[in-house]
Amino acid sequence: MFKIVSAREAVDRIPDGARVAVNSFLALSNPEELHNAICERFIETGSPKNLRLFCAAGFGVWDESRYADPYITAGAVSEIIAGHYNSMPAAVKAALANKIEAYCLPLGLLSQAVRASASGKEWILSEVGIGIYADPRVDTCALNSISKKKIIEVREFEGREYLMFRIPKIDVALIKGTTVDPNGNISFEKEYLTVDALALAQATKRNGGSVIVQVERVSHEFSRPRSVIVPGILVDEVVVIEPVTKTGEYNPALSGDVHVPASQMDYYVNKISTTKNRRINSADKTADIIGERAARELKPEHIVNIGIGIPEMVGKYASKLGILKDIVTTVEAGGIGGLPAPGVAFGATIGADMICDMATQFDFYDGGGLDICFLGGLEADMRGNVNVHKLEGGYPGIGGFANITFATKTIVFCMSFTTKGLVATRENGRVIIKQEGSVPKFKKEIAAVSFSGANAVKRGQRVLYVTERCVFELTETGLKLKEVYDGVNEQKQIRQLLDFELYD
């Protein structure tokens, strides 16, 4: 039977060395007060120590003073397995300094692994990840030299290769919902996502662990059965936190309480921060140029995924081009319909038609449900491989990228030709490169492979690389220059800046 307790009482029962799983998508549906209580207890008592954190997505908000980052910095954590690290700066610093073990796997694989664990499985097989960094024959999913666990192996079954991930057992699940009813049933009416709350609770109880849920209200009325996300039979402790949060005011357009027609989408997009404290050069229109060109790849009835960063501009220009109403956008966190929320709200959906569990969304993606996707990239090589998860001095992580690109019919990478200082504008339909970036993004060799060009060719996928000055296309022999924008000097501003020869 569940109990309503304080946050400190709930986390006081977390033992040293526990595997703690967080049901969150970056800052969304993330139980911040439970994190705060863990940090408070550790600072006061030195426990719980040697925590092993697990999260299919990530559990930070680009701020070292919030969520798990403070107790990671304090030394309470010994290991992290996650699909995304960029939102957790303290975790990245600790990992790169060899202070904690850290592993990064495709987000969809981890999400589906939680569900598999709920059904009693010890491991999961997936074709996602073959031929890229997670494949131990290519690279490693470990972030540093002290992370030596063999958590991914290659297996062959009926003539096909798979990655086998050994699923860790969860001791404690941290979940955030909205309401607890008299039977301990948890509903999520003011949450923007469910992530994988039900499967995580099931997996934790299957392992004999405890489920702690943070909510904002207690109801004397029994929930409508269809509204329950986590049933009371799976809940051990409930922590009630009144709805005064640091993550911003409640937005009914993100929870589904307000349906947003395509004609009003720009208004709701502009109400959400898109910067994550990034410094923006207002004179640089690189993202606009890329977003507008990429959006022209959209066709009526397309089912679409749009990534974070520069790809966010695709939604903006789909609206301006009048095609937004004719397509269906999706978000890997579970949203179908509407438009992906930008910036710190990424993962939520503005005006969604449906919000499903994350693993269910990845089933759809892995099965080839997407017609087209728009994703960013840190760098690309002459063979069409793309790196999104690893860069010098940091480790953004793979997120849903590997699953999204696995079976999508058309993949559009939205990335600038160079970076660090690039300023591009458009005047009278012509692109003007006012200042060249000092760091090339298209090069002969890249630091890591998040996307395999060879795999895409083998699967018959159409792949474009849309920049602010040109468009490349993937062919059997590698990158081919498909289009040069008006105003751009092909020889001086494209070919001479590459350290490899383009295939013609």
Image (cartoon, helix red, strand yellow):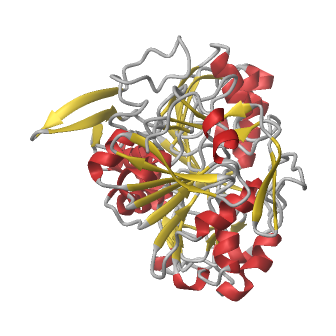
Question: Which x, y percent locates residue 327?
Answer: 52, 79
Taking depth in this image into account, of 460 and 403 the one nearest to the observer is 460
- The quarter of the picture where residue 410 lies is bottom left
Q: Can the viewer see residue 425 in this picture?
A: yes
Q: Image quadrant of residue 307?
A: bottom right
Q: Nearer the viewer, residue 101 or 287?
A: 287
- Using residue 285 as the reference point, say whether residue 500 is left or right of it: left
* Image-based side of 439 in relation to 415, left or right: right
Q: Residue at x 53, y 11 (%)?
A: 145
Q: Nearer the viewer, residue 409 or 210?
A: 409
On the picture, is 179 further left or further right than 410? right
Q: Position of residue 167 (x, y in %)?
A: 36, 35
Q: Is residue 220 above or below residue 162?
A: below
Q: In percent of the image, x 58 and y 76: which residue is there? A: 352
Outermost residue, right side: 282
Q: Quadrant of residue 274?
A: bottom right
Q: Is residue 420 left or right of residue 238?
A: right
**Residue visible at 26% across and 29% down in the picture:** 154
- Up-down relation of residue 350 to residue 357 (above or below): below
